[in-house]
Image (cartoon, rainbow, N blue to C red):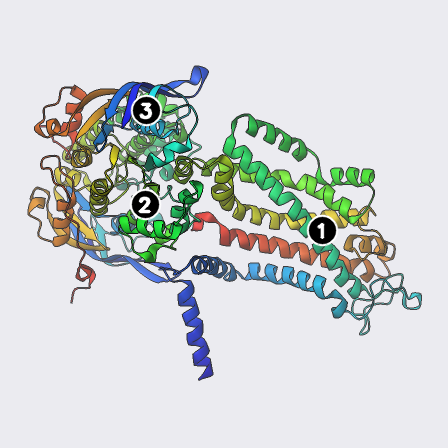
Amino acid sequence: MIELKDLEVWYGRGADRRAAVQGVTLRLEAGESYGLVGESGSGKSTILCAVAGLARDWRGEIRVGGRARGRGRKSVFARQLQMVFQDPYGSLHPRHTVETTLAEPLHIQRLGGVTERVGAALDAVGLSGAFRYRYPHQLSGGQRQRVAIARALILKPKILLLDEPTSALDVSVQAEVLNLLVRLKEEFRLTYLFVSHDLGVVAHMCERFAVMQEGRIVEETEVGNLRRGALSHPFTRELRQAYGGYRRHG
Amino acid sequence: MSAPLRVEDMNVSFEGPLGATRAVRGVSFAMNRERLGIVGESGSGKSTLARALLRLGPGRVDCRAMTFDGIDLLDLSASAMRALRGRRIAMIPQDPAIALNPVMTVGRQIVEACRASERVAWRGAKEKAEALLERVGIRDPERIFRAYPHELSGGMAQRAMIAMMVIAGPDLLIADEPTSALDLSVRHRVLTMLDELVTERGMGLIFISHDLDLIASFCDRIIVMYGGRILETCAAGELDRATHPYTRGLLAARPRLEEPRRLLPALERDPAWLEDAP
Amino acid sequence: MAEVAIKSQDFRLKAWLLDDSPGSALQARLGRFYLGWRAFARNPLAMTGLAIVLALVIAAIFAPWLSEASPLEQALERRLEPPSAAHWLGTDPFGRDILSRILHGARITLYIVLLVTLLSAPFGLVVGCVAGYFGGWVDRALMRLTDVFLAFPKLILALALVAALGPGVENAVAAIALTAWPPYARIARAETLVIRESGYIDAARLQGASGARIIWKQVMPLCTSSLIVRVTLDMAGVILIAAGLGFLGLGAQPPEPEWGAMIAEGRRFIIDQWWVATMPGIAILIVSLGFNLLGDGLRDALDPRQR
């Protein structure tokens, strides 16, 4: 579904040029959930941006649904993949009601039946009709993220790119959103590319994952190996060990 | 020479356009020189409580008693309270961006925090500051020392601020999500330093976080807050045996590495948890 | 009984406006507007400003009905009469009623203000949003152009333009508008630079929206509130420049009752017949103050940081 070959993404030009992602090759099958784990600045979100077409400078090959992504943003990819962002407060337009937010992609893609589709999308993410005309400031963090997911799903994409979708949420809300994502994946046969710094969330959501450090993938493995502790790279082992809280010396 | 903090029946309320909201409701607790964890979700009042302990707004604080080391904090004059803040009780706020002065180098801010509490020459204070920066895992303290806050990443700024807050050697440190912007490896160094301050210097630490695992593994005692009230207090090692349905719900809602589950149990909130005790 | 009924109706309206789950887009928008209005109405100075500006509008619309005397008809037998019951603000050197002239002058003032706003604000908004959103060479080109216009002193450029095109209200408006838009472009650009980094802009890009659509639908609505504040605050300056041009004889031409021109006429009599120059001066003062107060109030009410 998604294929990356020798992907390199960088920021800045000339002397300021800084590589954010280097030599990344990975492959996602249809219907799979694939995790990208790493610390801040490791390049995991940059990969998402490149796949989404939001990164400007990159090299290598990105194929989505068998089609190679070119330089520009192409509208055809809009129905193929969508993205959910980390910050539920910054990802909704503050002056748009839920209705406007959800209807906009339909207008852009010139799709009809706006009223029904918006209603169906709200239904799918478990929001009642009462939310339809609310502004973002009238929503809680979890509700905002549900709206963001509904916005991503309204064009019926096959792939969802999830950039730390629950890291700004409370544990109980995170559980609800994760459950929603699991349900939606089964219902719409979605493919997930899931970025998170939280090993627990990745283990819960994904079948396979890659660990990133300084722009490179240092280990790619199955979640089962993570559970068993069968990890090969020292950095992955370090992450695994630091997970779950603080360990006092001695 | 223990320096216990004792709070009795604290209430904090905000006047809003739609009437007053009570952010902290009838909170009482006492602590010694220990690591006290306060855990709760957003809106539980934990940060408001922390600020109210230092008599910092916003909100109107209404408290029956609040003493620290025998000093009545409610009765203290504003200037005496200012003298106490930073020197004896320090606080690491959630957002370093508001706590660091944007037009002063980080080093100067740390040095001044140090010199405000003890008579020490600039050079001595600088050495102390750089040692602290190194201790919180900053590899190049000399460079950070000369940098302005906007030149630092979020994690760097958070660590610089932690150094600034602990350099005066407070008796009580209130840390509000001090490690939220830090990566796991760095987080461990910061926690180790805080841990050492408690065990070696006998500092009291109030550690506020939404992260149950972290609090349970780092602290001695845990207060669980919800909707401005304390629902439950328990020893950190016994969090697994917590009795309140809210705590149990939170524990169950965490995704866990060890056991795969298709869905996570949703937390059912009971309005009765917020009702005032008869 | 009736009062109670009205009160409960009032209450129901308020509850409808503040409903957390609006039933329609209209209700949601009205509720939003009501919250803004409530913040605005709580500020007495802002309300004073609004009252003054409304008074200006009413004076402009109903000038012929508010004053019996003609603003243009001369009657030399009652020239330079002091304020009296017949002529509340006195008469000018041609025996015309000053109150009537000020009321009709409100039309010219409002005309200038509206025209300058309509010409400069949308233009500045578009230039700023486009420059900020696209960045790169588009940004550099548009901002250098803005700098060029910003470098001209407002009044001097207006003088030069009017001197070249000939005196008159329209030319004065053109001259003012030409120097008024650059600050609006700057404000819009600064806001756009922040807005374009938001998640909702990325989301719109992913949905396949064009740059023009993103600017129009997502960026501009967020820039307008700070622009409205700035435009309102600038109106006081526009009124002063217009009056200045009128005073110098380069704006509205006699016998039109323009306030600046009226002051110029009264200048010769300032010692003995003070009211001739003072009354239009007070009108300018009050209206400028009104726009400033209104602008400040709008800033407090529209400030996005408070939402």
| Residues behind callouts 2 and 1 on a single chain | no
Q: Give the class, few, some or many, for how many residues have Cα within 10 Å of label 1's Cα (few <14, many ≥20).
A: many
The residue beneath circle 1 is C112
In this view, B91 is above or below C232: above
The residue beneath circle 3 is A63
- Distance in Å between CA atoms under marks 1 and 3: 58 Å
Q: Mark 1 — on which chain does it sit?
A: C
* Three-letter code for the amino acid on which mark 1 is drawn: Ile
Q: Position of residue B268 (x, y in %)?
A: 17, 54
Q: Give the class, few, some or many, for how many residues have Cα within 10 Å of label 3's Cα (few <14, many ≥20).
A: some
Q: Which mark is residue A150?
A: 2
Mark 1 element type: helix
Mark 2 element type: helix
In this view, B232 is above or below B218: below
Answer left or right for A3 relative to B247.
right
Q: Quadrant of residue B10?
A: bottom left
Q: Give the class, few, some or many, for how many residues have Cα within 10 Å of label 2's Cα (few <14, many ≥20).
A: many
- Distance in Å between CA atoms under marks 3 and 2: 25 Å
Nearer the camera: disc 1 or disc 3: 3
Marks 1 and 3 close (CB-CB < 8 Å): no
Image quadrant holding the N terminus of chain B, namely: top left
Answer left or right for B179 relative to B96.
left
| Residues behind callouts 1 and 3 on a single chain | no
Answer left or right for B153 relative to A222.
right
